[in-house]
Amino acid sequence: MATTTAPTEARGRGDRWAGPGMLLPFSLFYLLFLVGPLVYTVVAGFFDTSLLTSGLGDFAGLSNYTAVLSDDEFWRTLRNTLWFTVLTTVPLVLLSLVLAILADRFVRGRWFFRFAFFAPFVLPSAVVALLFTFIYADQVGLAHEVTTWFGVDTPPSWLGDPDWAMISIAAATVWWTLGFNFVLYLAGLQDIPRSVHEAAAIDGAGPWQRIRHVVVPMLGRTTTLVTVLQVVASLKVFDQIYMLTMGGPDGSTRSSLQLIYDTGFVEGRVGYASTVSLLLFVVILLVSLVWFALVRRAEKER
């Protein structure tokens, strides 16, 4: 009995440590690249930390928070970020849903639509910015040519007009990131049993009625996931704005993350930039919590 029990006990001890052992590399990276910087950001927000001097610098207390909350540029960049979030979230949720429903109806060639809509998402942000720099170019860009075809004699300067710059960047972002939400919705559609569609058809429901009363309600959790992910991603916008307009014209497209970048890495005011980072984190957290609360209330009312 001893000869058979010992190997079993050894395997039991090995299995007990297998899970923590596999989690250890991820945990180290998580602590090193997420928890560590977060703790440093919280601490640096209470000091006059600078890239030009070593250490945390002099203790500043709440002066960084007072300065940020009284800074007009902070509120302007936050408004720009929220405006960009509205411009991108609504079409990226609705268009993804509509295109996924249409693509799901194709039995053959469905792989082509998946590839066609998802392909732009894998492009680097630098490639997308370069592409739309040519598209939005004044006088010679594709956007200029298309608008003149529709009889517009003087098309706007898409990236040079403060009234159009953010809208133009939002349109480029929708084209670029549409595929990710499209794939999520397509996966959700495939989880809906075909028997549900057949039962609705037997009851006399037409295609539009099935979409409205069967498909959309059953995609509720997917819509919640897509919306929250999209809101968080839009609130953290930086790459495409910085490479297309660098925050211009006249700061009309400058985002909160660009303010953090300029303040922390260009001006070297790490303590001030850390404070802006924490306040943006609070905004993102509040928006996510409010959305989850609204969704849960809607689910309870059903």
Image: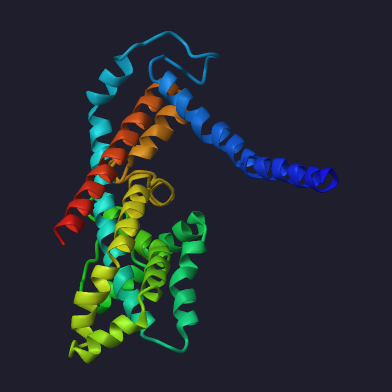
The residue lying furthest to the left in this view is 301
| Residue 100 in the image, given as x and y percentages of width and height | 35, 75
Residue 104 versus residue 8 in the image, above or below: below
| Residue 254 in the image, given as x and y percentages of width and height | 32, 42
Q: Nearer the viewer, residue 193 or 185?
A: 193
Residue 260 in sight from this viewpoint: yes
| Residue 130 in the image, given as x and y percentages of width and height | 47, 59
| Residue 42 in the image, given as x and y percentages of width and height | 41, 23
Which residue is drawn at the image coordinates 23% and 34% (left, top)? 75
The residue lying furthest to the front in this view is 1
How many numbered marks have been drawn onto this rendered protein structure? 0
Is residue 129 rendered to the left or right of residue 31?
Answer: left
Which residue is drawn at the image coordinates 26% and 43% (left, top)? 289
The quadrant holding residue 191 is: bottom left
Residue 76 versus residue 301 in the image, above or below: above
Q: Nearer the viewer, residue 296 or 133?
A: 296
The residue lying furthest to the top in this view is 58
Is residue 207 rendered to the left or right of residue 131?
Answer: left
Which residue is drawn at the image coordinates 46% and 89% (left, top)? 108
Is residue 243 rendered to the left or right of residue 145?
Answer: right
Figure colour scheme = rainbow
The quadrant holding residue 135 is: bottom left
Residue 161 in sight from this viewpoint: no
The quadrant holding residue 149 is: bottom left
Residue 126 versus residue 99 in the image, above or below: above
- Which part of the image, by quadrant, shows the C terminus? bottom left
